[in-house]
Image: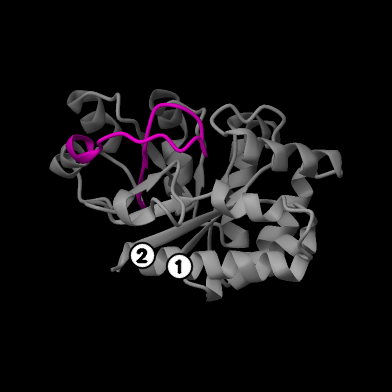
Amino acid sequence: MKQLVAYITSGYPEKSFSVDLALALGESGVDTLELGVPFSDPVADGPVIERANFLALEQGFRFADLLEISGQIAPKVDTLWMGYFNPFYQQGMEALLPKAKGLGISGMIIPDLPHEEALAYRGLFDANGMANIAFVAPTDTDERIRTIVSDAQKFIYLVAYAGITGSGQSEELGHVVDSIKRHTQTPVYVGFGVNEKTAKEKAQGVDGVIVGSAFINILLRDDLTHTQKIVQCGELARTIKALINE
């Protein structure tokens, strides 16, 4: 069974909504929740997720809100924190990781922390039983891929194209997937540009998909009530989960 990872922006449009949405997604076929930490300069994200980040911060999101939300979600849905390194660093990694473990967080996705710099925190992640998700890009050489994936945990985040999330680009990834699988048994999930139209194709040859902008597009709609947004996100999750497993 191929896995579905869903990204949502913590605290947007409000904390209680994030909890309700996360639990609904867990009941709709989402295997892992990527709980986004709002940040003022989300360099790897396109305008959709960037907008949600901005609105969450504008409404007063604080790191403490992430902890509160996580405590209600992680015991019921496998949950990762996705965020840029600065907010985590400001909390102090030695204090933050045990706190995350206590909440039930299973790992972190930090797109602006290069592999070599992430190695400095490997022991800390291991000591707390958490994964620091490795990224592979289509531009990486076979040698570079071998280095990145040699100790990868939980899954490998294969970036579908060089660029930002949600831009809908497409690249041939077969050679990259082959390279990854030569060097590790860790599952490979593809992200960037995955939605109900592209999911089936992008899931070919990999073990799962990561969907973000497609969910956030629904959350940004002003014509839907909170309940309608949750229902539509649940329907999207079920659709994508079925498509990738056809």
Quarter holding residue 62: top right
Please indicate, yes or no, whether residue 29 appears anywhere in the rendered image. yes
**Colouring of the image:** one colour
Per the image, the residue denoted by label 2 is 243
Q: Contact, CB < 8 Å: mark 1 with mark 2?
A: yes
Where residue 75 sits in the image (x, y, percent)? Answer: 59, 70
Is 92 positioned to the left or the right of 58 in the image?
left
Q: Characterize the local packing of mark 2: few (<14), some (14-19) or many (20 or more) Cα atoms within 10 angstroms.
A: some
Q: CA distance from mark 1 to mark 2?
A: 6 Å
Q: Position of residue 93 (x, y in %)?
A: 60, 37
Q: Amino acid at mark 1?
A: Thr
Q: Which mark is residue 202?
A: none
Q: Secondary structure at mark 2?
A: helix
Tell me which corner region of the image, top left, top right, bottom left or bottom right, holds residue 72.
bottom right
Q: Say which quadrant the N terminus sits in.
A: bottom left
At 28% across and 68% down in the image, what residue appears? 246
Residue 89 occupies which quadrant of the picture? top right
**Residue 170: in magenta span:** yes
Residue 239, disc? 1
Instruction: Determine the secondary structure under disc 1.
Output: helix
Where residue 201 appears, as percent x and y from the top left, is 30, 51
Residue 225 horizontal/vertical position (percent): 79, 65
Instruction: Find the magenta span and give its range.
Output: 154-176
The residue sitting at 75% across, 44% down in the picture is 63
Residue drawn where x is 56% and y is 46% of the image: 213
Please name the predominant secondary structure of the magenta segment in the image: loop
**Residue 28 painted magenta:** no
Apparent side of residue 234 relative to residue 70 in the rendered image (left or right): left
